Image (cartoon, rainbow, N blue to C red):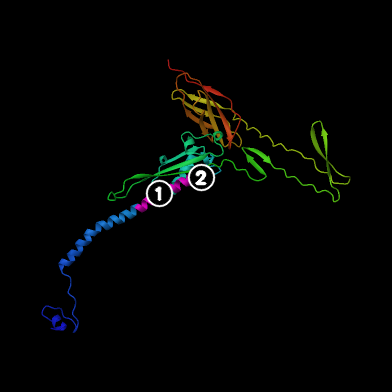
Amino acid sequence: MTEATICMQPGAPTTLPGYCPRPRANGAERAQAMVEFMLILPVLLLMLLGIIELGRMLFALIEATSASREASRYGASVGMSEGGVARYLDCAGMVDAAQRVVVLSDLPDADVLITWDRGSIDQTFADCDSPPSPADTALGDRVVVSVTLQYRPLLPLVPLPSFPIISRTARTIMIDIAAGPTATLGGVSYTETPTTPTTPTPGDTPTPTVTSTGDTPTPTETQEPGSTPLPSATSTTPPTATPIPAPGSFGITVTCTNGNLRLTWNAVTGAHYYAVYETSPTPPDGQICLTNKTRCDYASIQPDGVVHTYYVVAYIYTRPSLPSNVQSVSCPAPG
């Protein structure tokens, strides 16, 4: 039986001579393909979600690293913030610099930890709750920023737990920079005075002679007549820095009902910060307030009759002024 005869059998589709179409798949074959696809689909979706979650995890790691680097770079740079605070003391500015880098993750202020150390993570001496004073900060100190991002998978189908991603960056603080023949170090100006070499007149050669007085020989130079006299060597003493005047009219207003203090003083020209110190009873570091304003609100007085003594110092960069007048306050014990 020929192919054309087979295709023209009863029930066979009408076709052109010499062409016989292939039979279509029956319902059983289509059902089998659908079952196979449904079996492999969960595996494919799980692999796709795993790739997406791995990408999110790597992106969160990059964000945490970039945030800690940007915040530490801000805190280690020279300059003042918009609020008039040195950048290495501007905790709010460092937190804002870290948060600007983070795009997909959530970074609250509490997850940005800022500390200061002496060059080693084991030598931490201050944090944002108790910031260092300019007088306590020296060359070689570092600002350390630790950023924590909480990674959470999008769907619980992916077998990945939630965990924190932590990045820590430390940078040496650039407090002062000295460069050129005129430099400023700690507020004292030093000027390098160039010396001009002396060119003797041709034919006149100075003849050094040594004269002795007692046991110590003193070399002197003599010149032949007609020669150009040599300049005498002079020493230049660096100028003494002018003291910064003390903040004036330092006063305290106390409210014994809640123990609040308001400390006020007059501004000092050119001052960048003011630090209020307590001398009696002395806290661990003596400093109770660090601000760029001429006012400090502090709550520490208890109705126990204890006398508290305070004074304020102005700072131009790291140079302290003379201390202000001393004020003492106390709240009497009840009864």
Q: Image height check: is 315 above or below 46?
A: above
Judging by the rendered image, the residue that carries numbered circle 1 is 61
Left-right relation of 197 to 261: right
> Can I make out residue 75 in this image?
no
**Callout 2: helix, strand or loop?**
helix
Which of these two is toward me, 265 or 291? Answer: 291
Q: Mark 1 is on which residue type?
A: Leu
Going from the N terminus, do you reach mark 1 or mark 2 first?
A: 1
Identify the amino acid type marked 2.
Tyr
Farthest front residue in view: 215
Q: Secondary structure at mark 1?
A: helix
Q: Position of residue 177 (x, y in %)?
A: 60, 43
Please name whichever residue, 238 or 242, is drawn nearer the observer in this view of the structure.
238
Residue 74, which numbered label?
Answer: 2
Q: CA distance from mark 1 to mark 2?
A: 20 Å
x, y percentage for residue 278? 52, 26
Q: Is residue 153 left or right of residue 184?
A: left
Foreground residue, 77 or 196?
196
Image marks 1 and 2: residues in contact by CB distance under 8 Å: no
* Residues drawn in magenta: 54-71
Determine whether, in the image, residue 118 is placed left or right of residue 5.
right
Position in image of residue 223 (x %, y %): 85, 43
Q: Residues within 10 Å of mark 1 (few under 14, many from 20)?
A: some
- Which part of the image, by quadrant, shows the C terminus? top left
* Residue 289 in view (yes/no): yes
In which image quadrant can residue 4 be found?
A: bottom left
Q: Nearer the viewer, mark 1 or mark 2?
A: 1
Give the overall secondary structure of the magenta segment.
helix
Q: Residue at x 30, y 56 (%)?
A: 47
